[in-house]
Structure formats: structure tokens, C-alpha cells
Image: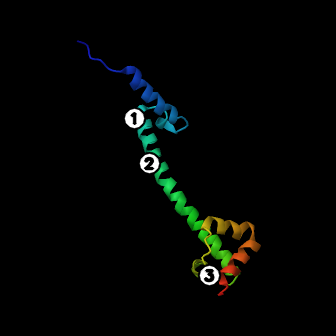
Amino acid sequence: MPRSVNTVASRARRKKVMKLTRGYFGRRKNVWTVAKNAWEKGMVYAYRDRKAKKRNFRSLWIQRINAAARLEGVSYSRLMGMMNEQNIDINRKVLADLAVNHPDAFKAVVKKAMNKN
């Protein structure tokens, strides 16, 4: 009995990966084994960097808040501590946006955090 291989499915699988590697440099775009390895490695980088992107943005927000807070005469650490004491729940993303785009609103938040009522 002849050996049965599902050529249609295997070719479709290969075509799918080859389509995804269009635009890669050299043999990475047209040699199956090299293209498959390049695509798999790209998926690993994409997964890893989706996590790293979150860390990078948090770091950026903290730097922006710290710079704006120091203009108000308080460090980032003390500002966040005071905000916690006053139960002001504003996340870092919004606080950084206020610091950059709405300095008056940021000043009001800092002033509210510094009040020891």
C-alpha cells in the first residue's frame, strides 16, 4: 500500500509561514527551514517585548512624574507617599499625562497631596 501524506495541509502550513516571512533579508524569506526558524524567533521576541514595553512605559511615567514633582519642590517618592496617605488614587499613566500636558492640574494634585488636614 502506498504511503499517504497529507500534502495539501503541509503545503498550506509552509505557505502560511512563508507569507509571514516576506520582507525578511536573505534566505530568511525564501528557504523553508531558515524562514521557519526566523519566524519562530520573531514570535519569541514579540512575546518578550510585549512584557518589556509595559516596564519601559512605567519607567517613563515615573521619570516624568519625578521631573514635574521636583519643579514643585518634592521628590517622586515623597509625592507618591503623600498621595497614598491622602487616599488619592491616580495611576502613574494619568499622573504623567497631567505632568506633561496639564501642569496646572498636576500642581493641584501635588497641593492636595501635601495638605495635612
Per the image, label 3 sits on a secondary structure element best described as loop
Outermost residue on the right side: it is 104
Q: Amino acid at mark 1?
A: Thr
Q: CA distance from mark 3 to mark 2?
A: 38 Å
- Of labels 3 and 1, earlier in sequence is 1
Per the image, label 2 sits on a secondary structure element best described as helix
Viewed as shown, does residue 12 lie left or right of 94? left
Q: Position of residue 114 (x, y in %)?
A: 66, 84
Outermost residue on the bottom side: it is 116
- Between 75 and 44, the one lying in front of the other is 75
Viewed as shown, does residue 69 lie left or right of 18? right
Q: Marks 2 and 1: CB-CB under 8 Å? A: no
Above or below: residue 40 compared with residue 7: below
Residue depicted at x 44% and y 32%? 31
Residue depicted at x 65% and y 83%? 74
Q: Marks 3 and 1: CB-CB under 8 Å? A: no
Q: CA distance from mark 3 to mark 1?
A: 54 Å
Q: Position of residue 105 (x, y in %)?
A: 74, 72
How many labels, in total?
3
The label nearer to you, 2 versus 1, is 2
Which quadrant of the view contains residue 64? bottom right
Which residue is labeled 3 in the image?
Answer: 75
Q: Position of residue 51 (x, y in %)?
A: 49, 56
Q: CA distance from mark 2 to mark 1?
A: 17 Å
Which residue is labeled 1 in the image?
Answer: 33
Residue depicted at x 71% and y 73%? 106
Which residue is labeled 2 in the image?
Answer: 44
Q: Amino acid at mark 2?
A: Val
Above or below: residue 74 compared with residue 106: below
Above or below: residue 64 compared with residue 85: above
- Of labels 2 and 1, earlier in sequence is 1
